[in-house]
Image (tube, rainbow, N blue to C red):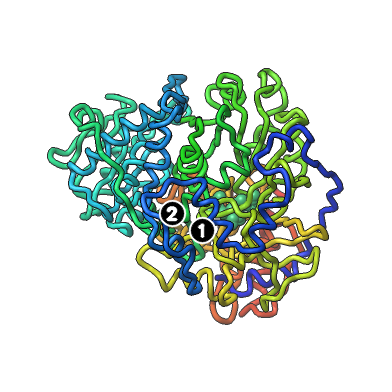
Amino acid sequence: MADGDGAARTTSVVEPLLVEQRRFPPSPEFREHAWVKDRTPWEEAERDFEAFWAKHAEAELTWFRKWDRVLEWNAPWAKWFIGGQLNASYNCVDRHAQSWRRTKAAIVWEGEPGDSRVLTYQDLHREVQKFANVLKSLGVQKGDRVSIYMGMVPELPIAMLACARIGAPHSVVFGGFSSDALRDRIQDAEAKVLITQDGAWRRGSIVPLKQLADKALTECPSVEKVVVVRRIGDAAEATMVEGRDYWWHELMATADPVCPAEPLDAEHPLYILYTSGTTGKPKGILHTTGGYLLGVTLTTKWVFDLKDDDYYWCTADIGWVTGHSYIVYGPLSNGATTVMYEGAPDWPEKDRYWDIVEKYRINILYTSPTFIRTAMKWGTEWPAKHDLSSLRLLGTVGEPINPEAWMWYHEHIGHGRCPIVDTWWQTETGMIMITPLPGVVTTKPGSATIPFPGVVADVVDEQGNSCPPNVGGYLVLKRPWPAMLRTFWGDPDRYVKTYWSRFPGIYFTGDGARRDEDGYFWITGRVDDVVNVAGHRLSNIEIESTLVAHPAVAEAAVIGRNDPIKGQAISAFVVLKAGYQPSEDLKHELREWVAEKISPIARPADVFFTADLPKTRSAKIMRRLLRDIAEGRVLGDTTTLTDPAVIAEIKKQYEEREAAE
Ligand code: WTA
């Protein structure tokens, strides 16, 4: 962590105190039909939180064997539903396929080029069983890891549920990641099998996933077999390696359609999902079966007030946790219809999302503040072209939403009729943690409001003491919750250090927040070395290391500066090696270098060449000061720097350049 970065942010940066007066209480009609109509769940959870979770574990999930104990908590090690046995795939598929829901649409899929597919629960049941048998035939056994590198096609959730069915933890790698990023994640998980596709559609062009996977696989000796979904055809130019690579459709053609779900311990690993942390190496967040499934099932039902006849659409990519929890596991466990879209929001036109809402008569829409701000920029004429009257609830996730964007969403998409749920959570929390329940909680634009029943959140100062109302501090969680991460895959020490050492026994989120006089939470963003670009978490240090790996670069510092659309944008400050000269070409080259090595989402918005970087006496880069410069603020405390003249010089040059551009 950069020296004093978080501490300084909460004390020295004057955050304009938003005085948000608007209030949106639930309408009586909405409340009347909502799953949760009053404060009872909060009261029950406060009386006995273990009994609260146990009651819902019993009501919402199907168990093969009931647990002996609800919780074993040896901070920071949690075990939930000890002795209980269940299967996530069974809960998401079989129990609905064996009920009146068998002919109900489970997955409604819209392809980018306009093709579509509907899988009923019965269809899903058959496909998942077949693919589970395919995995077994490729030698996958309970406990083996399976990496998945795919775009948004129905085979992706099928593959995940097939893994869950046989107890093989999946590790989904976002299809927008580079082959290097894929390689690192496969190596860390030591995956035995990789599932990918020939190529993915993106704005009408092809992302050659199989070619990228092949490059990664040259350095992944653990991978024995590769299954390839044919999405594009010959144009993707996928080549198959004899004895290693198999086409999905060929294996499925002969697969046995019966594969009973394996009874698994509640603590059996369900999946690993890599996310950016404060150091360069991605962290493998481990989620287990029972607690995770309960957390996502109950939050999906209550936060979105999900009913059986709803069409529910979460616009995230399944490569991120939002897609895991709120496209796949949460909705399917509830027996819902979950819509998934393959492509970009502006393809072929800027009204694609509104077109999908109208086409499928979407009732619940869950998206990101970045998308809402982008849609605002595109203009109200795009949503105005469509009938959005089916919508009854709107949600957001991924970053703080500014009140202006909240109001736009409310007026132009919800037409003043739909409650908005601003949901705060993380890959690590697995489930939504701070959120309104739409039938009960009065919302305030820009606030994620209050913790979900059973969750205890607080805002604390450097010493871990609760901050008074409207004083900024660190957001922490003070009580274990069922969907919490259990550890980092293969690195328990780092798990303890990252979340539980700053305030012993208390989970540190990495976010800053304040709580207002009504106890509502206002999240202000990351206070650690994590940048949040358009809701995607990136590590400053990972991008810096990538820049330094370029032959021209001696040193680099990367910061996230405020951006009106994406929340944050990346600025890179680069010191060149002797013999290299700053130039526009080199800037371009460095930006593309990062895009290629990590992902296009990590591409710096700007690169600034400098002779030196500001460092503390312990040789840590003071990113906070660079952010002050990039955001046009007065410089914070510079007394701990080895050479305060360095930062003054950078500021001068930066401002001269700004003036010239
Ligand atoms: C940020 C995404 C403000 C926050 C589910 C958190 C938010 C990080 C919100 C986790 C929100 C997420 N308001 N900030 N409603 N939701 N964040 O792991 O900084 O990709 O720590 O999980 O996103 O990002 P992650």
Can residue 193 be spotted in the picture?
A: yes
- As displayed, is residue 539 above or below residue 147? below
Foreground of the two, 24 or 513: 24
Mark 1 Cα-neighbour bin, 10 Å: few <14, some 14–19, many ≥20: many
198 left or right of 109 in image: left
Q: Quadrant of residue 439?
A: top right
Q: Quadrant of residue 492?
A: bottom left
- Say the numbered circle drawn on residue 582: none
Q: Where does the image place residue 637, in percent across and percent down from the top left? A: 72, 74
Q: Amino acid at mark 1?
A: Pro
Mark 2 Cα-neighbour bin, 10 Å: few <14, some 14–19, many ≥20: many
Question: Quadrant location of the N terminus?
Answer: bottom right
Residue at x 23%, y 30% (from the top left corner):
252
What residue does disc 1 label? Answer: 482
Do residues under tags 2 and 1 come within 8 Å of each other at their CB atoms?
yes
Q: Where does the image place residue 463, in percent across and percent down from the top left? A: 67, 78
- Say the numbered circle drawn on residue 290: 2
Q: Where does the image place residue 462, in percent across and percent down from the top left? A: 67, 76
- As displayed, is residue 580 above or below residue 374? below
Q: Amino acid at mark 2?
A: Gly
- As displayed, is residue 69 above or below residue 599? below
